[in-house]
Amino acid sequence: LARLGHWEPRVRAHVRGLLEKIGAQLPEAIVYPAVAGVVENPSSKELAAILEALRAARPGLVTDVSRAMGEYTRMTILPEDHLSTALQEISHKMNGVLRMMRDEAARVRARPDIRDGERVRLLRDKYQAVIIPVDQALQTARRAL
């Protein structure tokens, strides 16, 4: 399978032909690597063609292996990993929101035509508008646990 990425098209075609012949005789020998290869490199036309040939010959086998790989992935990625990823994304969003709120506060303070009460209201409304998506993301992450 590693040679399917060879730079010369003739070599790729030959390797693909060999793998398709092996797949016709012993599909169990290449179905897992083929499914894993397509998951890792979905743009590979050669792997996709081999997988389609396997699917035509043994559709149940390819479906079962794909389902099993999905379950392996689901079981190995812990909820804490999902939470960590979500919190990192939220932290990144919050940094942008804080930067934007500082800029907005400076703009509002710089305008002498706005009264103090109006400044507070404008900034509070802006804060609520930008914090709602972050709060929703936090609630989603909390429910995921």
Image (spheres, rainbow, N blue to C red):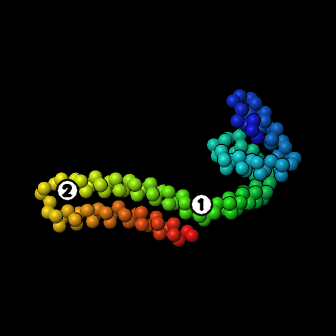
Q: Is residue 96 left or right of residue 88?
A: left
Q: Quadrant of the N terminus?
A: top right
Q: Is residue 102 above or below residue 47?
A: below
Residue 112 locus on image (x, y percent): 13, 56
SS at circle 2: helix
Residue 93 locus on image (x, y percent): 42, 56
* Residue that mark 2 sits on: 109
Q: Work out whether residue 44 can be spotted.
A: yes
- Under mark 2, the amino acid is Arg
Marks counted in the figure total 2
Q: Quadrant of residue 95?
A: bottom left
Please tell me which residue is depicted at 32% across the width and 66% down the height of the picture.
128
Q: Is residue 32 left or right of residue 88?
A: right
Q: Reading the chain from its start, which is encountered first: label 1 or label 2? A: 1
Q: Is residue 118 left or right of residue 86?
A: left
Towards the viewer: 95 or 10: 95
* Residue that mark 1 sits on: 81
- Under mark 1, the amino acid is Asp
Q: Is residue 99 above or below residue 80?
A: above
Q: Quadrant of the C terminus?
A: bottom right
Q: Quadrant of residue 118?
A: bottom left
Q: Is residue 83 above or below residue 55?
A: below
SS at circle 1: helix
Please tell me which residue is depicted at 50% across the width and 60% down the height of the picture.
87
Please tell me which residue is depicted at 60% across the width and 65% down the height of the picture.
79
Neighbourhood count class around disc 2 (C-alpha, 10 Å): few under 14, some 14–19, many 20 upward: some
Q: Which mark is residue 105?
A: none
CA gap, disc 1 and disc 2 = 42 Å
Residue 9 locus on image (x, y percent): 71, 30
